[in-house]
């Protein structure tokens, strides 16, 4: 099976497994992903909003337009990357996704990542960050890549939060501008399975010392 076919299968599984039936009942449709199964860059948001629910694609509303601008700023288009959310049905009234809802969708998201095996996973906002890098604060962790079990993550402010906040907009724009350099500096290491429950202890210490170049860019790496 190609990567695209494997990703389609995960989408079908979400429906067949009746993940979050209450959210599904209130939503127009499942909002699965956009972009390329072959991408080296994956963006993970929180949950679909009104526009996404209507169109069936992630990040197509105001925050999505801003994400498109940020991508254009580094010479990329959404077809060059892979975009998805943790929770794949719109929560009622755009409320925050609940911990149980995130937990129900997480195994499917992990499988998406295992299929794509991107170089860099960009975590958009606190909800997304907490799923992969628990215990960090987005206000401190944003813009700093972290390597964990062979995966490299970059937490960023959520584009919706930064949209109408001049200060945050400047910060997310300059964090985003570092993505090409970060990608260029990632030396691929074998990725271990995404056992998220083990992420916390693994954050504390890693036996291998990063090289001098890596130390400068991965300044917070264990
Ligand atoms: N915000 C998100 O987190 N995801 C979307 O798809 C749209 C807005």
Image (spheres, grey):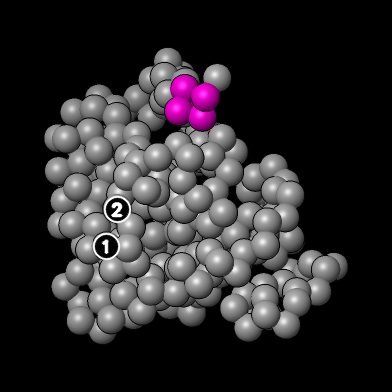
Q: Secondary structure at mark 2?
A: loop
- Identify the main secondary structure in magenta: helix
- Could you tell me which residue is drawn at 41 percent across and 68 percent down? 156
In the drawing, does residue 27 fall left or right of residue 47?
Answer: left
Residue 25, magenta (yes or no): no
* Residue at mark 1 to residue at mark 2: CA–CA distance: 6 Å
Give the magenta range: 2-6
- Could you tell me which residue is drawn at 28 percent across and 68 percent down? 73
**Which residue is identified by label 1?**
72
- Could you tell me which residue is drawn at 58 percent across and 43 percent down? 117
Q: Which mark is first along the chain, 2 or 1? A: 1
**Relative to 104, residue 189 above or below:** below
The verdict on label 2 being within 8 Å of ligand 1 is no
The extreme top residue here reads 16
Which quadrant holds residue 92?
top left
Q: Which quadrant of the figure contains the C terminus? A: bottom right
In the drawing, does residue 180 fall left or right of residue 117?
Answer: left
Residue 4 is tagged as none
Where does the image place residue 216, in percent across and percent down from the top left? Answer: 63, 83
Q: Which quadrant of the figure contains the N terminus? A: top right
Where does the image place residue 151, in percent across and percent down from the top left? Answer: 63, 55
Q: Secondary structure at mark 1?
A: helix
Where does the image place residue 14, in percent across and percent down from the top left? Answer: 43, 24
Residue sitting nearer the eye, 15 or 183: 183
Counting every numbered tag in the picture gives 2
**Relative to 120, residue 138 above or below:** below
Residue sitting nearer the eye, 117 or 53: 117
* Residue 132 seen: no
- Could you tell me which residue is drawn at 54 percent across and 48 percent down? 118
* Residue 72 seen: yes
**Which residue is identified by label 2?**
77
């Amino acid at each position: 099976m190609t990567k695209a076919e494997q990703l389609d299968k995960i989408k079908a599984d979400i429906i067949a497994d009746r993940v979050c039936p209450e959210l599904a009942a209130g939503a127009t449709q499942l909002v699965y992903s956009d972009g390329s199964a072959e991408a080296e860059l994956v963006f993970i948001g929180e949950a679909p909003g009104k526009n996404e629910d209507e169109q069936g694609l992630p990040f197509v509303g105001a925050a999505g337009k801003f994400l498109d601008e940020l991508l254009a700023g580094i010479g990329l288009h959404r077809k060059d990357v892979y975009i998805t959310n943790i929770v794949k049905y719109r929560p009622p009234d755009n409320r925050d996704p609940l911990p149980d809802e995130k937990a129900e969708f997480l195994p499917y998201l992990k499988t998406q990542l295992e299929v794509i095996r991107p170089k860099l996973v960009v975590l958009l906002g606190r909800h997304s960050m907490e799923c992969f890098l628990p215990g960090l604060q987005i206000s401190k962790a944003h813009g700093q890549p972290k390597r964990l079990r062979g995966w490299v993550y970059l937490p960023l402010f959520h584009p919706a939060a930064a949209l109408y906040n001049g200060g945050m907009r400047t910060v997310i724009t300059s964090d985003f501008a570092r993505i090409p350099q970060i990608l260029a500096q990632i030396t691929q290491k074998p990725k271990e399975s995404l056992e998220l429950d083990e992420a916390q202890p693994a954050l504390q210490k890693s036996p291998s010392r990063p090289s001098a170049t890596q130390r400068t860019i991965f300044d917070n790496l264990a």
